[in-house]
Image (tube, rainbow, N blue to C red):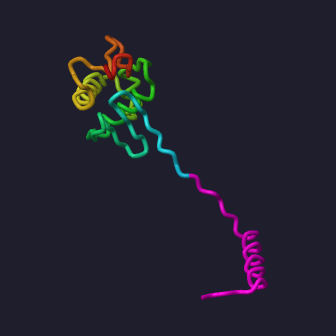
Amino acid sequence: MLTYEDSEEQEVNRILSMLAEYIKLEVVQPISCPILHFPGLEIRLFRRRVLQDGEDVSLTRLEYSTLVLLASNPGIVLTRTQIFEAVWNMDSDSCQSSISTVICNLRKKIEPDSKNPTYIKTVLGIGYKFDMRNAGE
């Protein structure tokens, strides 16, 4: 059994208080992990994970980035050019087929019925929007 006298405890406290003056410690807060929640769909941004009804969905980089862009702007119509420039990080006049292919593949992976999408809606002649009005029904 270890014992010490009050004078030893006071000495330890004095040393600790002196160290505290020289060593500045910052309280580290845990990083919150932003998650986009939608009925049947969850996007974990820092982990780059997508879950559909609790199951992992494997997405390519372009599919994931397109989904995050649309889901981060629910209800807002994004043109194909806006999506292409944001996701591909380049300007292009002929981005139509690339965007259409990514959206088609994305719908196959996250939509309960890719022929009747509930998450990613086509706005004819303009582009796409992430629409949650009928999701989860």
Q: Quadrant of the C terminus?
A: top left
Residue 99 position within the rendered picture, expressed as x and y whole percent measured from the top left: 29, 26
Q: Say how many tags the image has.
A: 0
Dividing the picture into quadrants, the one containing residue 123 is top left
Q: Is residue 115 left or right of residue 132?
A: left
Residue 87's place in the image compared with 9, above or below, is above
Residue 49's place in the image compared with 117, above or below, is below
Nearest to the observer: residue 134 or residue 8: 8
Dividing the picture into quadrants, the one containing residue 14 is bottom right
Q: Quadrant of the N terminus?
A: bottom right
Q: Is residue 35 left or right of residue 29?
A: left
Instruction: Point out the stretch of residues depicted in magenta.
Output: 1-29
Residue 122's place in the image compared with 71, above or below, is above
Nearest to the observer: residue 54 or residue 34: 54
The residue under the point 40% across, 40% down is 44
Dividing the picture into quadrants, the one containing residue 120 is top left
